[in-house]
Amino acid sequence: MMKKMMKMMTVCLLILSLAACSMEPPSWAKPGHHKELKDMKIGLSVSTLDNPFFVSLKNGVLQEAKKKGMKVITADAQNDSAKQINDIEDLIQQGVDILLINPVDSAAVSSAVESANHIGIPVITLDRSADKGKVEILVASDNVKGGKMAANYIISKVGKDAKVAELQGTPGASASRERGQGFDSIADKELNIVTKQTANFDRTQGMNVMENILQGHKDIQAVFAQNDEMALGAIQAIKSSGKNIIVVGFDGTDDGLKAVKQGQLSATVAQQPVLIGEEAVQAASKILKGKKGKRRIAVPLKLVKEK
């Protein structure tokens, strides 16, 4: 029995040793191997390419990298934190010189950021931050400010003390926390938030969650959804109910802006995902040249509302 236990412990130690070694890239793949920007490789880890917003963000990265002659290796985490960590390990193994990470979960991604830190690969985060590890620069909109913009707009449309539902994004994502923080800082005092429920930034979940909300809260006057995908899902549920409820989204995706133009979505707090991607590559170029810049690059927001 003792021999078996010793054997199992030896195997476990070997597995742990191999796992640790797997994070160390081969000598040819270590950062700093190249000198010219055109020889540099960017590793881009995106939370999900099922969301049009992040497709636009990726396109911004690709466009700006192409101008600079830099190669981009993209990985789609498919809204799976464990997959994202594996993706980042794989990007490190492929010898990227810098990592651009759009986290699925700000806490979960921290271990991958720390792994990159350990071997000297700089990290830039896009749209969402990482809770731990050294991040050179965060390129994002001011989500707190955007949440406040949404709250003030709803007050202007339905008045103070109106009954409001809030559809929240992925738990653990900094964007969810910050947009909610901004919205609640005003809505908690000026509006009556009757329910807050998570729909994970997903359109189908937004529709399903909204259907359930309407069952229990028939007198809701407005909805704040922390992204356009959830807002568009909520609109589908509201249409089926026959009610007249204003919906405000966040992101300014093509579908969101189209819905505002058609009078379906009352407003969206529009980000500029392409610009976020472009700014991230410009920041990466400076870092790879040894220059230091701002710790945060704020990309402007704009409230787009129905006429």
Image (cartoon, rainbow, N blue to C red):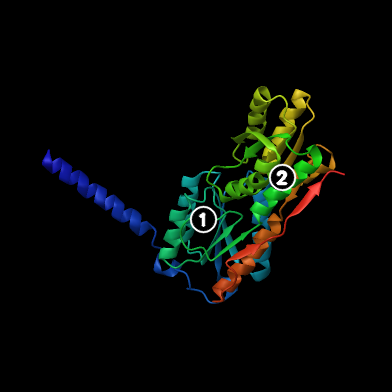
Q: Quadrant of the C terminus?
A: top right
| Mark 2 crowdedness (10 Å alpha carbons): few <14, some 14-19, many ≥20 | many
Tell me the residue at 71%/36% (across/down): 223
Q: Is residue 205 left or right of residue 10?
A: right
Tell me the residue at 74%/29% (across/down): 238
Q: Quadrant of the N terminus?
A: top left
Instruction: Tell me the SS state at disc 1.
Output: loop
Q: Amino acid at mark 2?
A: Ala
Q: Which mark is residue 197?
A: none
Of residues 51 and 257, the one drawn nearer to the viewer in this rendering = 257
State the image coordinates of residue 215 (x, y, percent, origin top left).
66, 22
Circle 1 is placed at which residue position? Answer: 130
Q: Is residue 239 left or right of residue 139?
A: right
Given the current orientation, which residue lies at the most extreme right position?
307
The correct choice, above or below, for 105 with respect to 35 in the image is: above
Circle 2 is placed at which residue position? Answer: 151
State the image coordinates of residue 234 (x, y, percent, origin top left).
70, 33
| Mark 1 crowdedness (10 Å alpha carbons): few <14, some 14-19, many ≥20 | many
Which quadrant of the figure has residue 204?
top right
Q: Is residue 124 left or right of residue 260?
A: left
The correct choice, above or below, for 22 with respect to 68 in the image is: above
2 vs 1, front mark: 2
Instruction: Tell me the SS state at disc 2.
Output: helix
Of residues 96 and 145, the one drawn nearer to the viewer in this rendering = 145
Tell me the residue at 45%/50% (across/down): 86
Q: Is residue 35 visible?
A: yes
Q: Amino acid at mark 1?
A: Ala
Count of numbered circles on the image: 2
Tell me the residue at 70%/40% (across/down): 224
State the image coordinates of residue 4 (x, y, percent, origin top left).
15, 41
